[in-house]
Image: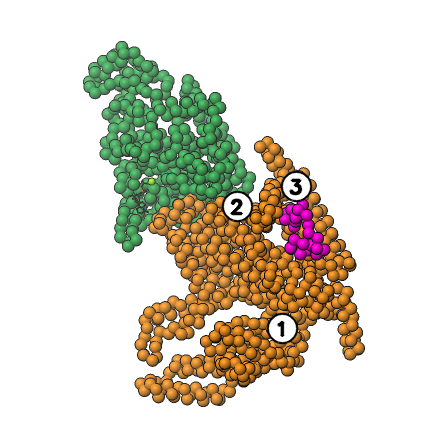
Chain colours: A orange, B green
Amino acid sequence: MNLFARLNVLQQGRRFKWIASAVLVSVWLLAMGWLWVTANRPDAAAGQPVVASQSGTDQAGVTPGPFARFVDAGPMTLVKVGAETAVATMRTPEGTAVVAAVSFGFVAGGLLVIWLGLGLSYLAILLVGWGVAWPLAAWPPTARLGQVLLGAVPLTLAFLVLMQALRLALGAPIPLFAVAKNVLIEAVRMKVSLVFIVMLILMMALVPGMLTEDQPLRYRVQQWLSYGVGLSYTVLALLTLFLSAATVAFEQRDRVIWQTMTKPVPHWQYVLGKWVGVMSLNAVLLAVSSTGVFLFTEYLSHQRARGETAYLVREDGRRSHPDDPNVRQVVDIRMNEVKQRIPAFKDTPERREIMARQVAAEFMSEDRRILENQVLSARVGVRPDPPILDEEAIKKELDERVAQVLADNPGMRETRSMRKAQEKELLTQVFDQARSIAPGGRQIFVFSGLGEVKKAVNRGELTLRYKINAGSNNPSAIYKVMFVISGYPREVTSALKVMNSMSIEPEVIDDEGKLVLEVHSHPDNGLTMSFPPDGLEVLYRVGGYEANFFRVMTTIWIKLGFIAAVAIAAATFLNFPVACLVAVTVLFAAESAGFLKESLEVFVSYDESTKTTNYVAVVVRAIAVPVSAAFERYADLKPGTSLVEGRLLGWPTMIQAAGLIGAWTLGALTLGWAAFRRRELAIYSGN
Amino acid sequence: MSEAPIVLSQGLTKLFKDFWLRDRARAVDGINFEVRRGEVFGLLGPNGSGKSTTIKMILGLLRKTSGRLAVFGKSPQDVSIKKRIGYLPEESYLYPFLNARETLDYYAKLFQLDGAVRRRRIDELLDMVGLSNVQHRQVREYSKGMQRRIGIAQALINDPELLILDEPTTGLDPIGNRQVKDLIDMLGRRGKTIILSSHLLSDVEDCVDRLVILYGGKIRAEGTCDSLLESREKVVLETDALDPQTIGEINGVLERHARSHARVSRPRQRLEDLFIGLVEKAQSDRVATSGAQHGGRTASFLEGEAGGAALIENLVEANQQPAMPADRPREAMKPAGPDQSLLSSLSAATKPAAPAPENTGAVEPDQSVIGSLLDGAGPDKPKSDGATENRGR
Ligand SMILES: Nc1ncnc2c1ncn2[C@@H]1O[C@H](COP(=O)(O)OP(=O)(O)O)[C@@H](O)[C@H]1O
Ligand SMILES: [Mg+2]
């Protein structure tokens, strides 16, 4: 007891803080230096694997003794793996900056802890946590539990540090901040929210173990991203919903709010304070979980891919790293060729760098290349140009159809809306027609606007994504199709209703930035095949996944903000269960607005054939139509899917989302404020 | 008193409606009163008489149905007046997950008090309500009385001009009870305005300047304590122990004056005093407690910072009976009764020395309402109150 007290005094002391900070910073500097030297050692680049394989045997084939196994199971593995991943990252362009930034984040956290006077406490938690986890991880029956704990301890610490930082940041004596800070304390000290928080951290630590090693690396990475991001969003959405509703509703039920609102607290500060509290908790949790997801993605992607003996080392011994001597040799040869062809060509280091990256990509194993280009990347998709319509023919056909309808229904008059409906139907048919190919037939698709890709210096490869439908999509049918891309034929087979992808070379884009795709359906195919509206797309890479990852997480946070606002607004005048119900309903409506919109097209209130009005449908449409219109953009925004499919969620998209969802959030909060202001707090009709 | 009143109520009415907007209860029914600056104002009435409802309207927690209500000359919903108000609800409604210190810190921040002021006030208030040594335990672990004490501290954190206490002594032990009364007394002397509600006459009689008595949402009586409580028909006589002979003589005197129902009885020590004595002894013997401590000094910022303490000290000394230093200043005697000639004739035979009588104000309930208040303490009265025991009969 006395020892603890004395240690506590020690860690609060100024001298301790300075010394500990100095130690931490020097360790960091030393580590960075060591990593840099290791990463730039010339012999390391000569095809030596950077990351030791995970299985028990080393690359040398020596089985480690029990002691080594014990050491390997412990936290040292984390450090080792971290160091190896860092070294590997540092060998990629900009890698040094990434490693420096990420590791500085940890150092900043450490400094914060030290200066909060908690240095020794946190160190103790870390040591005790790992001390428990280590033997568990080393003993095979509990290895999994131990590994989960090994990962959970640093995540928990990160959570604690960030919460401390937040409580400091919200320390100002302003009602808004006081209310917000109170939400944070409530979230941590009330059991319900804590369950969510623990759940999130444990799941983050648990999922990596579920990724089986027998599948290609790209699938593992994709699965991890999908689980990691999906889990974070789901858990945080639920936590946000319940916490927001609870913190506002229970306070009124339990009358604790009386003492708050009889103090000089403007209503808006109370409502906004609650929101800020929930959202800063979300920010912390999202930061922790996304750091977890990011670091483990980095780790995974530096593992051996299919067809590699080690990271970036192909089974045939080729090393697909831009700095590899073999790669440099090829670059030299190609540069000379170009210079001979184009005398004016300038041989700059940048050009060489770009070419080195291209050559390295060519040297990659297929698994690695797909991983880099289709998963850990930010790609933009282009759909085929719409068919050029013959306006005259369309008009003629439309007139005929309208006349036909009038002839079939003697009492009917021609109205604008009826003509519109006919036109819509006709166009849909025409477009569907343009994507359909009979057995033995062919169809031409043009993708334009790809000029930038061809010119782009940092271009990656292009991907063609396609999905084939035919009839009622017999699950056992296999269709044979030939794609002729700018003259180069390629034959493929595919099951129906399955999304496929195929790599194509950027060279196939013509000078106008067009890519011409000719699709032939094999005569043996049973039925007319067609591509659904989203079933044909050319994707090109515009960057890596890192910045995309950040934007995806930010977008998720923005979406959580809306959930929080709805739940808070509902809870200002409804009791907890009802508020939750309302918030869930709004959320569900928002998320499913896209689906709703599709359903509404067939769900009509007036049946032309029977000439009856379905009044239930009238009511449903009256609610559903505005909802689907309002939330269409919200529903379109699928940050998790973008990340998993390696699609770009660009700054403009993110800012637009922030604007749109931000406006909705503000609207919900304003509603909550108005309802709250009108409330008589001492009348508790809520329960 | 030409100054504008702190609270002004005219025809104030509150109707509670049910879900279908039907009238359910007329909790407050057209009441008129005003609370003047610097007075201790009592709202007295049995349970359900509309005291809390009135208070909640003053605080803006409820909206009036009709009538006029101005607090500091403004609408009760106005946020700007809240800076000057402190409120203790009828029960303790606190965040269970905060500890005492965090609770006070939270409320202090709502008043935008900066760090140093906050720290000092919290320290002093915790000390005053006797929770300093349990300040890091979460409020949910506290006993009812301990929660009440935080409630009181919370109401004082902004050094309010207007302090509204809704039945402040419920749930408190006799010492806490006494402390609250002392506090009210002290704050009253410092010129604070206090609204005090209670269903116990004994709670308010020694500290309020003026009071209204509510029943069924209407005001049944109004005036100063004395004018309401003064009885012209009975008198209490308290002395040191008397031998039977003296008692006989006194009875003789009384009989000569044809007071047939008079009887001299032995005064008993008040339970409250006994209890205080016991605890004070325990404290001087340093017996530890894990519950609420006997509170310490009144927070000095409440005493008006510099100079305030000295002023109080003076007042205390002026009131203190030199012979009984343990006694509290508050027990200044109230006029016992109007029958001066009788009194003076008695005083010749007895020694009106210490101990000073606690409650000489005898009550003759000339209104049935007041009667119900006296022994209306009933089942929800948590402690045995010494005050009712030596009331003359
Ligand atoms: N929220 C409410 N809804 C309906 N009736 C209420 C409500 N609050 C108080 N009342 C009624 O108003 C009357 C006065 O209550 P209150 O002011 O709390 O009395 P007290 O004098 O004991 O503080 C009681 O009859 C009570 O039942
Ligand atoms: Mg009451």
**Occupied quadrant, residue B166:** top left
Q: Position of residue A350 (x, y in %)?
A: 74, 68
Name which residue lies at 69% across and 41% down.
A19
**Occupied quadrant, residue B258:** top left
Name which residue lies at 35% across and 37% down.
B197
Instruction: Give a yes or no on whether discs 1 and 2 share a subunit.
Output: yes
Q: Which residues are magenta?
A: A52-77
Q: CA distance from mark 1 to mark 2?
A: 59 Å
Q: Dot 3: few (<14), some (14–19), or many (≥20) neighbours within 10 Å?
A: many
Q: Secondary structure at mark 2?
A: loop
Q: Chain of mark 1?
A: A
Mark 2 near mark 3, Cβ–Cβ under 8 Å? no
- Number of numbered tags placed on the structure image: 3
Q: Earlier in the sequence, mark 1 or mark 2?
A: 2
Q: Earlier in the sequence, mark 2 or mark 3?
A: 3
Quadrant of the image containing the N terminus of chain B: top left
Amino acid under disc 2: Pro
Can I make out residue A372 in this image?
Answer: no
Q: Position of residue A138 (x, y in %)?
A: 61, 47
Residue occupied by mark 2: A173
Q: Earlier in the sequence, mark 3 or mark 1?
A: 3
In the rendered structure, find residue A17 and report the number of the disc placed on it.
3
Residue occupied by mark 1: A503
Q: Position of residue B59 (x, y in %)?
A: 39, 45
Tell me if residue A399 comes above or below residue A87 in the rendering: below
Q: Chain of mark 3?
A: A
Q: Nearer the viewer, residue A112 or A267?
A: A112
Nearest-to-viewer mark from 2 and 3: 3
Amino acid under disc 1: Ser
Q: Is residue B318 left or right of residue B362?
A: right
